[in-house]
Amino acid sequence: MPKLVNKLLLMLLATPVAFAGNVEVLHYWTSGGEAAALDVLKKQMADEGHQWQDFVIAGGGGGNAMAELQTRVLKGLPPAAAQIKGLDIQRWARLGFLANLNNIAQADKWDDKLPSVVSDVMKHNDQYVAVPVNVHRTNWLWINKPLLDALNLKAPKTWDEFDAAAKVIQDAGYQVIAQGDQAWQHATLFEAVALSVGGADYYKRAFVEHEFSAIKSAETDAVFERYYKLVKLMKFDSDAEWHQATNKVIEGKAAFQFMGDWAKGEFIKAEKKPNKDFMCVPAPGTANKFLFNIDSFAIFNLRNVEASEIQAQTALVRNIMSDSFQSAFNQNKGSIPARTDMSMATFDLCAQYSMSEFLNANDNGALLPSIAHGMATTGTVQQYFYEKIAELTKTPDTPAESSKQLAKAIRYGQYILK
């Protein structure tokens, strides 16, 4: 980091906001629940006199967003912060584009507030270069409770129970699973099935360590067998976005959705209550297992800018880690705080359950990064994973042949990185 930026950060740690600055932030939060959650941060920044500038890429992260960010950075015009996560944070840090946040982190005792599974992702060469917003769990099953109650059904804990419930739901004329026809949504369901059917050790070997023999195996055959049974229960139509699928569950048109806990933000926005209007339960067979997705902002080096912009950037970092933001944002977003030193008393039952599952999984070796959401691998491998799962969802093959194709796709994704 340039000496001037380091000096300014040190000064700002000891002084209150004296003048307002602009802060440009790249993010992908555009759905109702997501936008409401982000408004919490925007308000905190406005209350301190800073002006927020959206650098929005609608529809989630991807190649177009990263290409646009890369163009801006190479021109020497990066945003103050960008929504980047997982191994891609390390890529930007290795190239020298990210700021060293250790002065702020040490002053505010981040290491005491963040579990290592979170802080490790935020660091490069033992330097904080990104700030975590939350922890999402991806292996949730969302349920319309009144619909199940009307059909005298319980939340399924096993796949046998799920199959039995699905038959009753179908016979009653309702859609069983709400799912948008997008690659990342299929990948989200697939990884939950992989964790359930194969177990934590298998998931780690196959989708974190990318062992070819683990992916091309009898365990993966069994994963595809279960996954294809679920695909048969889906009905794809023009409503492709994940929140549109969530709305089908909210409205009672469908019974279930397999989705991360950002879906809860849509239930909250619709003024629905957990255990009354909807239920949040682990995907069958994944109790005490936790696939995590950490939303985070990588903080970019700003050169040749006004001191007020550095001050606004520092305020952004500190606001993200503040008690007020971590609490208010995550209650809107559906996730849990990245910080484990905070009280969960004001959070709803789903969030309290999620934090309990997070801590349990951490203790029993079943706290694992999501491959579908960019935590377990690089963006390149993730894209090959997406494409292959989407292809096999549209045109299923035998489980054994599907395992072989998936193993080849992930291996190729690794190969072209070298």
Image (cartoon, helix red, strand yellow):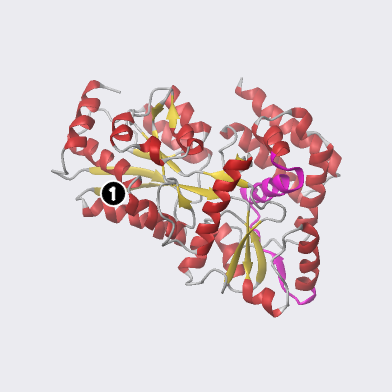
Image coords of residue 239 (percent x, y): 61, 62
- Residue 348 located left or right of residue 239: left
**Residue at 44 percent of width and 34 percent of height:** 122
Magenta stretch, residue numbers: 171-200
**Residue at 80 percent of width and 69 percent of height:** 167
Vertical placement of residue 82 versus 48, above or below: above
- Residue 52 located left or right of residue 248: left
Closer to the camera in the image, 95 or 66 = 95
* Corner quadrant of residue 354: bottom right
Picture quarter with the C terminus: top right
Closer to the camera in the image, 75 or 175 = 175
Residue holding disc 1: 52
The secondary structure type at the circle numbered 1 is: strand
Instruction: Please tell me whether residue 378 belongs to the stretch shown in magenta.
Output: no
Image coords of residue 399 (percent x, y): 84, 44
Q: Amino acid at mark 1?
A: Trp
Vertical placement of residue 134 versus 413, above or below: below
Magenta stretch, main secondary structure, is: helix
